[in-house]
Image (spheres, rainbow, N blue to C red):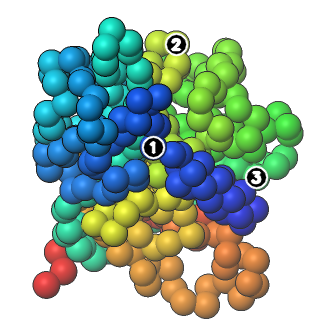
Amino acid sequence: MSLSKLVLSACLLLSVSFVISCKNNTTVGSGVSFKAPEQGQSFPLGTDVKVALEVPSGSNITSAVYTLDGKPVATKNNADPVAIPTKGLSLGYKLITAIIEEDGKKDTLTINFELKSAVVPSQYGYQVIKTFPHDTAAYTQGLEFHNGRFLESTGQEQHSSLRWVDVPTGKVLQQTKLDDQYFGEGSSLVGDKVVMLTWQNRLGLVFDAKTLTQQSTFPYQSSMEGWGLCFDGQRLYKSDGTNKIWFLNKDNYKEEGFIEVYNNYGPVPQLNELEYIDGKIYANVYTKNVVVVIDPATGVVEKEIDFTGLLPAGYYKDEVDQANNVLNGIAYDKAGKRLFVTGKKWPHMFQVNLVAKP
């Protein structure tokens, strides 16, 4: 990712926020409207959301069917309030629809509310266990550990690559360069294939894992960009620079849903490189020395890891290099229980242990 990505994604986030804030409560012809919740009202995940109708005097509601994001949640033969449980749902904006019937005529009302995290993330620092060399020409976008080697994908126009890397020496064992039109992004090993993202080409690439020969491509659907990628053995997770993480089918790479990631303050945007570790998603937050640990079922940030100081202060003298060559790259050796982190064009790969903060 380049600094321009940060600007573009911020604009996209503002646009999305503007659209959400401009959605209005729908009132049917008879004057029935939502009394509760308020438009865009926020609730902690796990709260029962009260839904009530404002019915003008003289109106007689004989049926009210309520759905949440298109799924039925309650049915009434009057206008009595209902409570929608949110335990186990994912975070973000939800759409309530009420299909009401009055004097044989049906009408539809809709309203949004927001589910936010009620969890205060546990805070962690780190301890460096070992330091390994890292190619300072590698603008690291994706990183994984497999069978004693790193699988690393790199970015930037005309310099993007996919490579197998020796852990102790940092030497590139095998490499394929992407076509100059592609800005390479995250990658993940899926069976005998490596799936790799591109940034703004709206296209994913598929390689043979042994030869690193490109075999095919696939288009993105609703997600606009490609940032980070990881695999849990059943499905792929894809970040796009917002606070969303998309679910991709491991066989055809089609998007099958998403979660929105929140901490206790609100949405966490700029999610970048991803790693799946022991049932959780670890994600770099672009331009920050922070990795967040996410529940993939809900989008709740459970931990925040502060890697400040991992790269010596002042290593990059140039302001542009400082802005671009940020923390990015998380790999986990499942058998050896080793966690590795690095950054874009960093001189080192670090094996670290996490240390809980007081």
Compared to 53, does 130 lie above or below?
A: below
Residue visible at 72% across and 76% down in the picture:
321
Residue 129 can be seen in this image: no
Q: Mark number for residue 357?
A: none
Q: Position of residue 231 (x, y in %)?
A: 39, 32
Residue holding disc 2:
252
Compared to 28, does 296 lie above or below?
A: below
Compared to 15, does 195 lie above or below?
A: above
Query: Which quadrant holds residue 116?
Result: bottom left
Residue holding disc 3:
156
Left or right side of 254 for 302: left
Q: Nearer the viewer, mark 2 or mark 3?
A: 2
Mark 1 and mark 3: span between their CA atoms? Answer: 45 Å
Q: Earlier in the sequence, mark 2 or mark 3?
A: 3
Mark 2 and mark 1: span between their CA atoms? Answer: 38 Å
- Would you call the spot at circle 2 few (<14 residues within 10 Å), some (14-19), or many (20 or more)? few
Between 246 and 55, the one lying in front of the other is 55
Q: Mark number for residue 25?
A: 1
Q: Amino acid at mark 2?
A: Asn
In terms of secondary structure, where does tag 3 sit?
A: loop
Between 177 and 307, the one lying in front of the other is 307
Q: Amino acid at mark 3?
A: Gln
Mark 2 and mark 3: span between their CA atoms? Answer: 26 Å
Q: Nearer the viewer, mark 1 or mark 3?
A: 1
Residue visible at 13% across and 84% down in the picture:
358
Q: Earlier in the sequence, mark 1 or mark 3?
A: 1
In terms of secondary structure, where does tag 1 sit?
A: loop
